[in-house]
Image: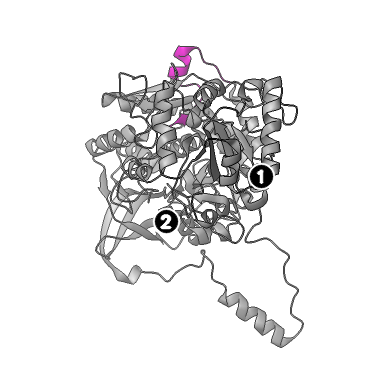
Amino acid sequence: MSKSANLSRRGFLTGAAATGALAAVSALAGCSPEKPTTAEGANSAASQSEAKASVFDKPASVADQVSETKDYEVVVVGGGNSGVVGALELAQLGAKVLLIEQTGACTIYAGDIDALDSQIQKDLGIEIDKEWVIKDLARYGQGKVDENLIRQWAYNAGAFIDWYQAQMQQKGLDVMVDTVCKKFDPEGIWYSPASVHTAYKPPLKETANSMGSEIAIPAMLELYAEAGGEIEYNTTAVELVQDSSGKVSGVIAQNKDGEYIQYNTSKAVMLATGGFGGNKDMMDEMGVMSHKFCSCHIGAENAHGDGIRMAVWAGADRDYACEGTCNIFDRGCITGDDANGDIGLDGQGGANPMLWWPGSQPFLRVNALGKRYCNEDGPYDIVFNQACMQPGHYWWQIFDASSWEDVVSFGTTICSRVVAEEGAKNCLLLGQYYPCTNADEWQSVFIDPNVENGVLIKADTIEELVDMMGVPKEEALATIERYNELAAKGVDEDFHKAPFRLTAIDEGPFYACKLAGWLLSTMSGVRVDNTYTPITPEGDRIEGLKCVGLDHGGFFNGMYAQYYGGLNMSHNVVSSWLAAMDIMGEEYPVPILSAANAYKG
């Protein structure tokens, strides 16, 4: 169960780009009602309670509709990055494995992998303080995280990259580490370790490289088949099978013909279904307010929370502290008459498929009142959250004809990179767009197509641009005039943005883009122990079951640490890799005694 439909991410988003893809109030919040004081009131309250459906209501069993049973040692549910990695490791360790995927193809999505102490880094002389990173991520999560899981990731992710590189090299591919880091002002305000690993096909070209999952997933699927692994596509898991002790002994799934098949497992079921970013009802019930402020949900459509719900029905405790956590880019577009992408408290978001990849560039940002409201040079999550506090919950990005010189000066990295640079991954973006090497490429790749499809507004004068934006004219013009004054001084006296990211808007033509968030994934799920086995509210293990990747919680809270490039992907694949080892009785590359001692035996 992955985030993709029956096509690859590259294929889908290439088509999306052609039509413009690039061109916390909780639903659970509020006071509890007073207890009814009369029998009539009690009956009314009970009736209302019974009528309120929940996404966690357990459906009737379909066990009596099973038409066939099949036996495996392990069934992996979900063909995304974590599911494919887990299935491959299991098969290579000798397990009889079945991977089931609800769509017609495994997901080709993302590809950057954060890690510490890989051999690639060691060869480059890159040293990163793991304990510093652990403390920083715990701080970033406001302490509402399971430090044991973070520490286990930090000490094992490097070994994962070594394994991953060995797999890629078997198929003529390789793995590189991106050594180009963003400069911060003041220095050190945000930590950005040189730890972004990406698979690529040698030789590495200056731009437009196919990289990451785009090439890694097909390679791993070949290796999986060579190791004897099996796959069934268009097959959706619906129910876990448990014995009298509560141990999971299989999973029931519905195939493309509508038949229910029971897959018995002698070792485990691994749930890797990709979270619930495509289930708006579940996001509402789980208190995920962020999706309401995202005009675009590309990449999350098929993540329905199936794995999380099946684990809860089996007795797993939800990770309440992390409810609401999402991975969000500040690049969703609002265009034309689409009612602001259906964003806002009364909306559900995701109404506009348009993307503006340079949305994270620290150009001037103004709100619906025409006012500048923040230092534009922050992590995607923070500048997105700042915008959500503004009227209408959206913002405008404004720049001028000198934008190529500006983005070269800005020097953004990781997923926001738009300028090719030696030592950087310089990959294809969304199937066809890539970091540029000169102004002509920038104009032809990013500017002109997005003016044509309506993502960008273009005007010959600032006055005309403001009129087209529809914001209060006097306020907006005063804001731009003030911004230009600060740029001339070279000092941002208002928000203290780095001087080299403070550039004037004074050369026509002028451009503006109306923006909101782009929801990539949710990142909360069920509670697990250090073996990625779900645990009950009492802390007991649900044997025979693993929840990996976006189906388990405890790693993130509130916001995603965007400047740790590839952290979400790394957490996903390292968890499934380690869970596979535990299923097969293998010791982790770096056992963490404190983590092993933190849970019930």
The magenta segment is: 112-128
Residue ID at (50%, 19%)? 180
Q: Local crowd at mark 1 within 10 Å, few (<14), some, or many (≥20)? A: some
Residue 240, magenta (yes or no): no
Residue ID at (71%, 20%)? 489
Q: Secondary structure at mark 1?
A: helix
Q: Which numbered marker is on residue 473?
A: 1
Disc 2 and disc 1: Cα gap in Å?
63 Å
Q: Which residue is mark 2?
A: 248
Q: From the viewer's perspective, is 477 left or right of 128? A: right
Q: Local crowd at mark 2 within 10 Å, few (<14), some, or many (≥20)? A: many
The amino acid type of the residue labelled 1 equals Lys
Q: Is residue 410 above or below residue 468?
A: above
Mark 2 or 1, closer to the camera: 1
Q: Quadrant of residue 480?
A: top right
Can you see residue 48? yes
Residue ID at (37%, 42%)? 17
Q: Residue 49: x and y, percent?
A: 61, 75
Q: Which numbered marker is on residue 268?
A: none
